[in-house]
Amino acid sequence: MPASLPNDNSMESYQLHVEQCTAWLADRLDKPLDLLIQLGTGLGDLAGAMENAVLYSYDQLPHFPQATVTSHSGNLIVGRLAGKQTAILQGRFHWYEGYSAQSVGFPIRVLSQLGAHIALITNASGGLNLAYQPGTIMVVADHINLLPDNPLRGPNVDAWGKRFPDCSQPYDAQLRSLLLQSAASLELAEVTSGTYVCVPGPSLETPAETRFLRLIGADAVGMSSVPEVLTALHAGMRVAALSVVANVNNPDNFAPIRIEEIVAAARDAQPRLRQLILHFIESLAL
């Protein structure tokens, strides 16, 4: 893990690093942000639609975590997207890489300090709902967090948010409705709504684990996104999430799961995802 990451036991150090990274970016941005978009595995192709885009690699940004997964580019891109001042996180970090949940949420915390008040989180997932098909885009309605960590663990910074943020509706109902309306307007096939479960990884699920995850109410499973969502909620942001279902496995007829196939399936869904996101952002009233 990079030495520049804050000590998990020192909220004072973490807060200082957030403030330093925020100040570094604030000196370089000419406008406050409207929203942030985080792109997950195999879903990095959206920045091409931006106007006046400025790219910062993660290693340029003070105290920023570094992406170690090959399908995550590791860039922050800022510009105009569908008329909105947008920050795109091209690649993310995972608990299984050795980062704490707090460190995984670091980019969201920084961008929330720069004005972003809407967060759109995307990921690639495995399908648990047997009605889904590879390539299904799931508008996340709720989540189950099975990570043994929480980005809000430790002393609370009251200036950032309440000690106990409400999670009765973690995914903004109006934003979810707008995403589904956009999909209908574009006549996109295989767009649905469901519950996402976050597991630690990096090992993929066994048949018994798949049965368990279905039993507790999950429609899709992945290894990311929940720490970022919780950080955004704590910061008072409105949150929406899209999960691209890359494969579907029946626990009673299980097939090998290969990460290369998951990445490839997510990339195949990129044109539809890009259409959906652009239409959604154009429809936002900020």
Image (cartoon, rainbow, N blue to C red):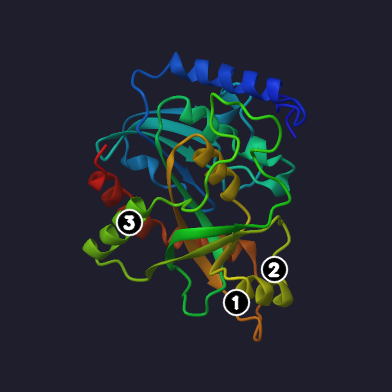
Q: Measure how far apart labels 2 and 3 are at the Cα level.
A: 29 Å
**Can see residue 256?**
no
Q: Measure how far apart labels 2 and 1 are at the Cα level.
A: 10 Å
Q: Residue at x 35, y 41 (%)?
A: 48
Q: Are marks 2 and 1 in contact (CB under 8 Å)?
A: yes
Q: Secondary structure at mark 1?
A: loop
Identity of the residue furthest to the top in this view: 27
Earlier along the polypeptide chain: callout 3 or callout 1? 3
Whether 182 is drawn above or below 215: the answer is: above
Dividing the image into 4 quarters, which one contains the N terminus?
Answer: top right
When asked about the image quadrant of residue 162, the answer is: top right
When asked about the image quadrant of residue 188, the answer is: bottom left
Whether 28 is drawn above or below 208: the answer is: above
- The kind of residue on which mark 3 rests is Leu
Q: Which mark is residue 249?
A: 1
Eye-nearest disc, 2 or 3: 3
Whether 284 is drawn above or below 147: the answer is: above
* Residue 177: % across, % down: 32, 58
Residue behind mark 2: 205
Q: Secondary structure at mark 2?
A: loop
Q: Secondary structure at mark 3?
A: helix
Residue behind mark 3: 179
* Residue 24: % across, % down: 51, 16
* Residue 39: % across, % down: 48, 46
- The kind of residue on which mark 2 rests is Glu
